[in-house]
Image (cartoon, rainbow, N blue to C red):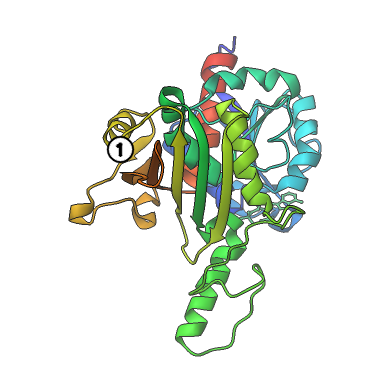
Amino acid sequence: MNTDRTLNVAVAGATGAVGIQMISCLEERNFPVKSIRLLASGRSKGRKLTFRGREIAVEELKETSFKGIDIALFSAGGGTSEKFAPFAANDGCIVVDNSSAWRMDPEVPLVVPEVNPHAIAQFRNKGIIANPNCSTIQMVVPLNPLHKTYGIRRIVVSTYQAVSGTGKKAIDELDLQTRAILNFKAFESKVYPHTIAFNCLPHIDVFLANGYTKEEMKMVHETRKILEDDSIGVTATTVRVPVFYGHSESINIETKTKAAASDVRALLEKTTGVKVVDDPENNIYPLAIDAAGQDFTLVGRIRDDESIENGINMWVVADNIRKGAATNAVQIAEILAKEYIGV
Ligand code: A2P
């Protein structure tokens, strides 16, 4: 039991789109921070970031960076997590990792606090907890109560994902390309293989041998792991769209027992973390610009799929940097602190 009631925290990838939001979430949610260490690549060494009104210099991430740290939030890419998380765990620090490096390791829990908080206990295996993919998080938050109540047989999902999911360079690329096109100026595509401004790219992460992208297969495997049911059929098409913040998803589910749209709406209205935004007659439905900057998963356009016996369609939107990454990681850290470290 920690009697001090505050913790030494580190953020690895502190200068990135998610890292900066992690720092804000720790502050906003009043996480019990005693000290905070901000880590990034050598390029950012000495750069100042602010936490609780104090400027803190960024340090270079090293194998020894985690001595004396209780919890580290990682969002510095898969390779960095793969290399450095074991050093952190070896020094007694618990890692909450936002990359895909550890998600499918059977010894590492993959957690969405509203869905499977009990899995956090498995952090003891390797000292690592994985934060799921942003698109998966916002899908399982509303689908979990439906699976528990009606049993989900199959999920067909198409995503419309914001550029912030790729990181800061992609936010800059959409910004620069949009201005260039509107001003008839020349521009380059450095982050994506094609122009992202005024376009939609059916390509997120690398293509695999089965013709799907890695992002699409993450949605398949992670959904089954979090919902603890390998029998659920999942098929995904993931698309990058010229939106800065907020992923949108068209989700079709087939359930084992009949779920009418009105039942689904009623169930989701009392689901933690979900806000039902569903009044189409008044042009009210979830929008990326409304989801951005807050932590609810917005669900609307809930309707019966009239092409099958037990089908439902819905439109689900969340802030990919907050609930899809930083907020989810900090929520995990809160449960760790309260229920496992005793702070
Ligand atoms: P840096 O800013 O010094 O490059 P984003 O996803 O927005 O691109 O952010 C990625 C984050 O991961 C940044 O904080 C970046 O630091 C950090 N990062 C990338 N590569 C490394 C590395 N090899 N070691 C430590 N931090 C890294």
Q: Which residue appears farthest toward the top when viewing the image? A: 1
Instruction: State the image coordinates of residue 336 (x, y, percent, origin top left).
Output: 57, 21
Which residue is rendered at x = 74% and y = 31% of the image?
A: 105
Q: Quadrant of residue 228?
A: top right
Above or below, 81 relative to 160:
above
Which residue is rendered at x = 41% and y = 42% of the image?
A: 308
Q: 66 or 270: which is nearer to us?
A: 270
Instruction: State the image coordinates of residue 61 (x, y, percent, origin top left).
Output: 75, 44
Residue under circle 1?
A: 261
Q: 3 or 229: which is nearer to us?
A: 229
Q: Is the residue marked by circle 1 packed among few (<14), some (14-19), or many (20+) residues within 10 Å? A: some
Q: 266 or 167: which is nearer to us?
A: 266
Residue 46 visible to the viewer: yes
* Relative horizontal placement of residue 211, taking residue 270 as reference (left or right): right
Mark 1: amino acid: Ala
Q: Quadrant of residue 93?
A: top right
Which residue is rendered at x = 60% and y = 57% of the image?
A: 167
Instruction: State the image coordinates of residue 63 (x, y, percent, origin top left).
Output: 81, 38
Q: 206 or 28: which is nearer to us?
A: 206
Q: Quadrant of the N terminus?
A: top right
Instruction: State the image coordinates of residue 156 (x, y, percent, origin top left).
Output: 51, 46
Label 1 lies in ligand 1 vicinity (Cβ under 8 Å): no
* Relative horizontal placement of residue 208, taking residue 202 as reference (left or right): right
Residue 51 visible to the viewer: no
Secondary structure beneath label 1: helix
Q: Which residue appears farthest toward the bottom when viewing the image? A: 184
